[in-house]
């Protein structure tokens, strides 16, 4: 079975274009695989079939911040920029868990973008969605306190159970420093809002964290 069956967003392409893409082979990557680093050139347009890719930025101080995650049906704005302008990557992309993806080579991507209206609509629609989420991130980091961002992130991550993440990983996702995360989690644990263990945070009082998450709204 072709991998295109796993990418419903491409169902609207013309048969000849689907046949062309069907020749590409999916890649199965383990968690922690680096897809690109700052300074790399974009080689192709990644279609994530399963799993998740985290794109993060590291400042001169060494502080890391999660810009966005790419899951099935979503796009990487850094890659789209790079393919259209030949600009090098300024961020790093790493698989957050086992991930299956297909890389559409740059030449194929540009050709489809030029002559396929369905493909062009797909790419720029995903690009617009990603840009909207990036602007939301800028707004959140600029105008929301770090503890509110951390509370909101914990609520999101704990929807399916305990959060399996280090303090450094949570700091990157909340756009703050690891020390801030450690202090906040210690304080919340004393209040009975969370329970912590090595590499794990269990949310106990969702109502308390929800109130805090919305405090700056």
Image (cartoon, grey):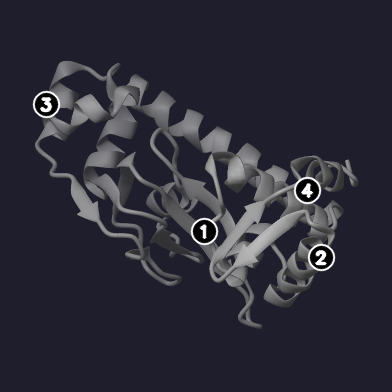
Q: Which mark is residue 19?
A: 3
Q: Nearer the viewer, mark 2 or mark 1?
A: 2
Residue 47 badge: none
Q: Position of residue 108 (x, y in %)?
A: 22, 41
In the rendered image, which residue does mark 2 sit on? 190
Q: Which residue is mark 4?
A: 139
**Which secondary structure, mark 1?**
loop
Tell me the residue at 30%/40% (across/down): 110
Sequence-earlier tag: 3 or 2: 3
Q: Nearer the viewer, mark 1 or mark 3?
A: 1
Please say if the residues under marks 4 and 2 sit with CB atoms less than 8 Å apart: no
Q: Are marks 1 and 3 in contact (CB under 8 Å)?
A: no
Q: CA distance from mark 3 to mark 4?
A: 42 Å
Q: Nearer the viewer, mark 3 or mark 4?
A: 4
At 85% from the left and 48% from the top, the residue drawn is 212
Residue denoted by label 1:
164
Which image quadrant: the C terminus? top right
């Amino acid at each position: 079975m072709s991998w295109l069956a796993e990418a419903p967003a491409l169902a609207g392409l013309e048969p000849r274009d689907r046949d062309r893409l069907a020749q590409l082979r999916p890649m199965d990557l383990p968690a922690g695989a680096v897809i690109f680093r700052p300074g790399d050139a974009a080689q192709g347009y990644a279609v994530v079939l399963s799993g998740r890719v985290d794109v993060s930025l590291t400042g001169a101080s060494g502080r890391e911040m999660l810009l966005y995650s790419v899951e099935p049906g979503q796009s990487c704005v850094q890659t789209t920029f790079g393919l259209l302008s030949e600009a090098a990557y300024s961020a790093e992309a790493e698989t957050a868990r086992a991930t299956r993806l297909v890389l559409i080579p740059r030449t194929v991507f540009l050709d489809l973008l030029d002559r396929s209206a369905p493909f062009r609509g797909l790419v720029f629609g995903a690009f617009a969605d990603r840009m909207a989420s990036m602007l939301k991130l800028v707004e959140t980091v600029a105008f929301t306190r770090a503890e509110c961002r951390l509370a909101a992130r914990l609520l999101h991550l704990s929807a399916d159970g305990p959060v399996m993440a280090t303090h450094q990983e949570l700091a990157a996702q909340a756009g703050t420093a690891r020390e801030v995360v450690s202090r906040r989690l210690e304080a919340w644990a004393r209040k009975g809002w969370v329970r912590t263990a090595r590499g794990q945070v269990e949310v106990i009082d969702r109502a308390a964290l929800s109130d805090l998450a919305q405090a700056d709204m």
